[in-house]
Amino acid sequence: MEFIHDDFLLHSKMARKLYHDYAADQPILDYHSHLPAADIAADHRFHDLWEIWVQGDHYKWRLMRANGVAENYCTGAAPPREKFLAWARTVPLTLRNPLYLWTHLELKRYFGIAETLNENTASLVWDRANSALQSGDLSTQGILRKFAVRVVCTSDDPCDDLSSHRALNASATEFRMYPTFRPDHALRIGVPGTWNAWVNRLQAASKKEVSSLNDFLEALRQRHDFFHAHGGRLSDHGLARCHSTPCVDRDAALIFDKVRADEVPTDTEQEQFASFLMLFSDAWTPKRAGRSNFTWERSAMSIQGGRGKLALTPATTVSAIGNRPLLSAHIWTCWRGNTPCPRLSSITSTRRIITFSPLPWAIFRMAQSRGRCSSAARGGFSTRRKGSNGN
């Protein structure tokens, strides 16, 4: 039997029934991606397997580096085929890593290649995949049609004019592309020259002079409205940690003026300013939604942590890998500020599933008394090992 087959990962009769009879033919609503909007609008056709598959994939680079592959073959100037061969030599060592499964699922589903990828099969895979890329329906739009994608949401800087989204959505296509508001640059005041260059871009995009903190916030709010007018209903924040340092308006204004004058802020000031902006922007989406627990209208948060990635959507659940301190920081920030707390039901760790009610009881009672937590949120933890209860 081939490694990737029709019942791959479907280990029971019920699993096969649910997938084949119900799930397999459902359309895809991709609410978070890092796909380049310009390439989708232009229906870009990829030159080779490296470009479509490995060129922008930092997960693959990380494993290649762990395997001792020189940086020249990850992000350097080595020829594409040589870079691909370096990845192929790494793949067998990724067994039991999700990338091993994803690699072979993608080879099978996109290119019809059933062979497992390794140093011996690399040339065959390279040639067959490149042939399919040039002659098949594997342009950017062709791929989205092939997999019945109806909506794709990209991640976009507030300064983006969204011309690619507008052009695509004005054409007669089977799917729509919507922007996601990702204001990471607004928080990164640590390098004043870079930040001020971005603020100047924001100034041009909003057609509003930015000479004070209020101007800055209004320009960001205007861009948020612009994204909303073009179908955007999500925000995304790439954070190294949850920012939860108190900062009043006056202090934020002083920090803004300091950095705008090209002075380097202290670490504390950077943390204060980021905390201020997160609370400020977090108040926009509930007002648009009319209620705070409508996921598509509230900010989604992607947090890059030391041990994994935390994806936070306020209405339902949280999936995390060893990032409970980050989660607690966000909840504490919600309680201190004016943002309703998310209702969170589970954290998934590498070793166990933790059913997590978000707040210790005392903090919950304080938050509830201020009207910032649902009564459904209760303090305490319960844990169960994976495999218990049949899971």
Image (spheres, rainbow, N blue to C red):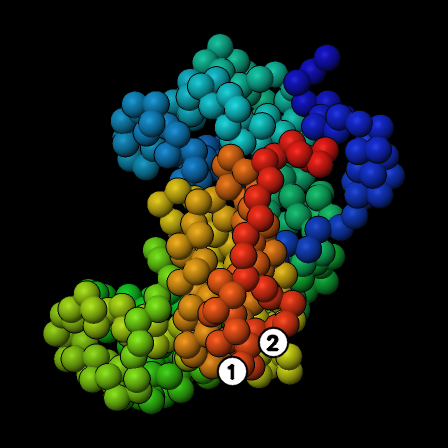
Q: 11 or 344, which lies in front?
A: 344
How far from the left and from the top, in percent, is residue 7? Answer: 76, 26
Side (left or right) of 274 relative to 335: left
Q: 108 or 309, which lies in front?
A: 309
Q: Work out whether 80 lies above or below 384.
A: above
How far from the left and from the top, in percent, is residue 37? Answer: 52, 58
Mark 1, Cα crowd under 10 Å, few <14 / some 14-19 / many 20+, is few
Q: Residue furthest front?
A: 362
**Quick check: can you spot residue 106?**
no
How far from the left and from the top, in percent, is residue 189? Answer: 24, 69
Mark 2, Cα crowd under 10 Å, few <14 / some 14-19 / many 20+, is some
How far from the left and from the top, in percent, is residue 67? Answer: 34, 23
The amino acid beneath tag 2 is Ser
Q: CA distance from mark 2 to mark 1?
A: 15 Å
**What SS does tag 1 mark?**
loop
The residue that disc 1 covers is: 370
The residue that disc 2 covers is: 292
Total marks placed: 2
Q: Work out whether 151 lies above or below 73.
A: below
Side (left or right) of 171 relative to 85: right
N-term-proximal mark, 2 vs 1: 2
**What SS does tag 2 mark?**
loop
Side (left or right) of 182 relative to 195: right
Mark 2 or mark 1, whichever is nearer to me: 1
Q: Residue furthest left?
A: 263
Instruction: For the C terminus, give its image quadrant.
Output: top right
**Quick check: can you spot residue 294?**
yes
Side (left or right) of 207 relative to 145: left
Badge 2 vs badge 1, beta-carbon distance below 8 Å: no
Q: Work out whether 235 lies above or below 240.
A: below
Residue located 45% across and 58% down the image: 327
Residue located 51% across and 41% down the image: 349
